[in-house]
Amino acid sequence: MGRRFAELAFTPTVKDQQTRHGSRSQYQRVETSGNPGAALGPHEQSFVLQRDGFYMASVSESGWPYVQFRGGPKGFLHVVDDRTLAFADLRGNMQYISTGNLLHDDRVALFLMDYAWQTRLKILGHAEILEDSPAAPNPAVKEWLDRLRDPKEKVPAERAILIHVEAWDWNCPQHITPRFTEEELAETLEPMRRHIAELEQENARLRKTNS
């Protein structure tokens, strides 16, 4: 955990709970001697680019938290630089809960999961929404959408969302249930498939020799 994440997450009440349960001294050291934990390093950037989905939390005007899953091909969440992420917001069920929440309070939390390797990355930041107005189209919005949108995607992109990163933290892998995508399973099973194919070829050769 970096110092910046601790600065944002460890409120007085949180620190009271850490003291009560015996972990305050451990996390106090993070606040004074941990890494900065603000800019995304090469490892964090690579992890982001390999994800095909993430969870995004926002807060409504009534104070209720809201979590939404965003998915797409690997790399749909772009790394603009070490302090900025961005993605094209595609048209969905047209409830616009996240959009409305972020226009009220731009603070956002991202949860990026790698179930196969039991790894998760938490990111805190501020969301910037770039959207055209029908009365006054903005060329900058089109440039961002052209940059972020997958050319194979048929669903319209309504806006670009930039996440200005404030802090990040690698979370404990404990209790993450391993799950694998079809692509990950194919990569894992490919050596076995090749071996089976070789055995089948060898069996066919032996049968032909002995016939």
Image (cartoon, rainbow, N blue to C red):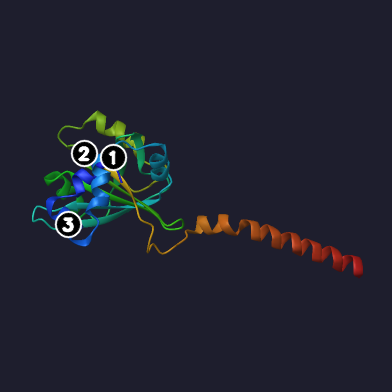
Q: Is residue 193 above or below residue 9?
A: below
Element at badge 2? strand
**In the image, which is nearer the foreground, mark 2 or mark 1?**
1
Element at badge 3? strand
**Number of on-image labels:** 3
Looking at the picture, how far across and down is residue 155, in whole percent? Answer: 34, 48
**Label 2: which residue?**
128
**Label 1: which residue?**
33
Looking at the picture, how far across and down is residue 139, in whole percent? Answer: 25, 29
Q: Is residue 210 left or right of residue 1?
A: right
Q: Where does the C terminus fall, quadrant-wise?
A: bottom right
Element at badge 1? helix
Between marks 3 and 2, how big is the CA–CA gap? 18 Å
Do the numbered discs 3 and 1 sit on residues whose CB atoms are within 8 Å? no
Please tell me how crowded label 2 is: few (under 14), some (14-19), or many (20+) other residues with Cα within 10 Å: some
The disc, 2 or 1, on the residue closer to the chain's N-terminal end is: 1
Write the residue at 80% across / 62% down. Answer: 202
Can residue 61 be seen in the rendering of this structure?
yes
Q: Is residue 104 left or right of residue 34?
A: left
Q: Quadrant of residue 33?
A: top left
**In the image, which is nearer the foreground, mark 3 or mark 2?**
3
Looking at the picture, how far across and down is residue 43, in whole percent? Answer: 42, 41
